[in-house]
Amino acid sequence: MKPVSVLKDNRGAALVVAILIMAVLMLIGAAAIITSSIEIKISGNEKNSREAFYAAEAAWPTALIWLDSQSAPFMGNEDDDTDDPRIVSNVAVGTNQFSYELNYQAQQDIPGYSTDYKNFYYDVECTGNGPGVSESSVQITAGKAHRVVY
């Protein structure tokens, strides 16, 4: 009787190839699931960041409306006679919040006008808080003309 070589026997080779192909497909599927879950988290963070930015963008018009309503130039917090900024915080915008800080910077003569009028310049630092811990900041410089001699 002749000895039968196991290596020359092809039975079961298709099963091994099929298992290897399935293992590769499972790895590709797992990578796709991990990638898509990361992409979902990224898009959620981007949405939260965008909402925080919109809240910060809503702050500066509010600060300018307050500044425009002032009949005298704002030079700081008059309650304690310091140059402290005007700070407004935790204003609700839908489900988000914003705050702003208004700082007096300088005054300057207005070209072509009487010296009774001056431009007053302010830095407005706005912060918006969105869902979760998202936060965004916007900074603008604003000016307003005031009559300084009455």
Image (tube, helix red, strand yellow):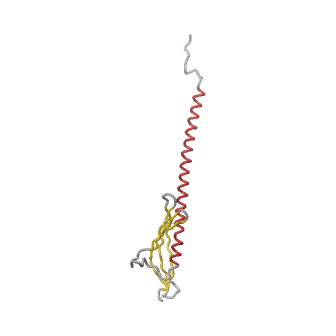
Q: How many marks?
A: 0
- In the image, residue 24 sits, relative to residue 137, either above or below, namely above
Residue 62 horizontal/vertical position (percent): 53, 72
Residue at horizontal 47 percent and vertical 75 percent from the top = 122
Check the picture and name the quadrant holding the N terminus: top right
Residue in the foreground of this view, choosing between 34 and 12: 34
Q: Kindly give the residue lying farthest to the top in the view shown.
A: 1
Residue in the foreground of this view, choosing between 95 and 112: 95
Please tell me in which quadrant of the rendered image residue 30 appears. top right
Residue 55 horizontal/vertical position (percent): 53, 65
Residue 78 horizontal/vertical position (percent): 42, 79
Residue 58 horizontal/vertical position (percent): 54, 68
Please tell me in which quadrant of the rendered image residue 18 appears. top right
